[in-house]
Image (cartoon, rainbow, N blue to C red):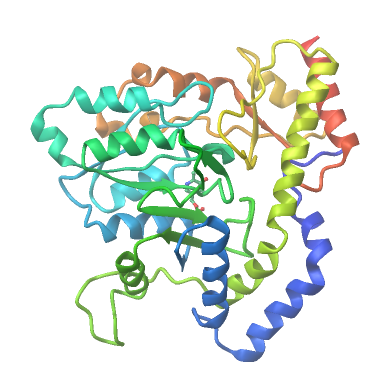
Amino acid sequence: MKVPLLDLKEQYKRIKDEIIKAVMEVFDSQQFILGPKVEELEEGIAAYCRSRYAVGVSSGTDALLISLMMEDVSHGDVVITTPYTFFSTAGAIVRVGARPLFVDIDENSYNMDPVKLDATILSLDEKQKSEIKAIIPVHLYGQCADMEQILDIAEKNNLIVIEDAAQAIGAEYQFRDGAVKRAGSMGTYGCFSFFPSKNMGAFGDGGVVTTDDPEIYELLKKMRVHGSGSEYYHNIVGGNFRLDAIQAAVLLVKLKYLDDWTKKRRENAALYRRLFQEKGVKGVSLPKELERRHIYNQFVIRISNRRDELKDYLIKGGIGCAIYYPVPLHMQACFIYLGYGPDDFPVSLEAAENTLALPVYPELSHEQIEYVVDMIDKFMK
Ligand SMILES: *Cc1c(COP(=O)(O)O)cnc(C)c1O
């Protein structure tokens, strides 16, 4: 049996007619950049993410970049994030000229550990503290970071929060007072990606920034077109961060199905849990649902010591699986200058060595999931 890590063709088959019709409309209009499709998508995404506004941009990376540019983060500034994320979270910080300050993750959620965040800030002197401009928590694998604590620490230290919600569209977080918010609606900015492997993927690159602030919303729209308010007049320098109409047309079709797909991903995760338990598979830790509505962009297991062996075994058996991420960012060659040692972030390092993502995409069959669990069971025995 074959079980790919992700099979976008299965998804496409089911919505092909609708997608082609939507894309043809864009072809017929010959309006490719921004325009009514992008605006319609922005309204749909804002409503879906329960934010007031959304601004379509060219990628998730550019969503992070434009948010940092909006806040004038640049040389001499410091931005806090985790070393256990996709490269671009830290890459965006460096691209505006600032310096990433890493905080280790929590071993159960793989997200920024608020206790370590607080301790890291407390360990700095006043000058170092004054250089910090923002915190970028990442909602890794589709589960929200501990936002209540992170927002409290940010407020106490007068820092803005930019959520990296690239893997978490529609994920929910519950505050102690019972309020429930969606990923991207809690910080000043929410950054999303429509890279094809995300839960809602475009037919190319794309992204969106969400915000509740009307002034930020207006400025974001300028910033993505070179900072121009009226054409050819610039009072700020932005970039070309536009989303194109073809991607918006595709995404508008997909947005209607997103909740259904999320439900199926959650059901697949639940089926994994049930089967791992029923078969009594030993030595495998399953992902923990610590916050409300995990959307399972990835279903990541952890096994000590034999991860690479298991990965090879599964791939030989026709099962797609992958390591997100094999090298924590503090160990990347381009970040050696930051001066970190391997043991500075032990939880991230351990996760990089022992985690493995299994297929969890919506169109998987019961038999495919059962096959994955059986193969892991066989390997562990
Ligand atoms: C995918 C991803 C990004 C970048 O998104 P792109 O659209 O590929 O630029 C940023 N952060 C995280 C956590 C991601 O998973």
Tell me if 131 is positioned left or right of 345 in this view.
left
Residue 34 percent location from the top left of the image: 49, 78
Toward the viewer: 95 or 288?
288
Residue 376: tell me if it is visible.
no
Tell me if 307 is positioned left or right of 370 in this view.
left
Residue 257: quarter of image = bottom right
Residue 309: tell me if it is visible.
yes
Quarter of the image that includes the C terminus: top right
Residue 212 percent location from the top left of the image: 39, 60
Residue 362 percent location from the top left of the image: 76, 47
Tell me if 283 is positioned left or right of 226 in this view.
right
- Most extreme residue toward the front, as rendered? 177
Count of numbered labels shown in the rendering: 0
Quarter of the image that includes the N terminus: top right
Say if 47 sits above or below 135 in the image.
Answer: below
| Residue located 81% across and 55% down the image | 10
| Residue located 74% across and 10% down the image | 282
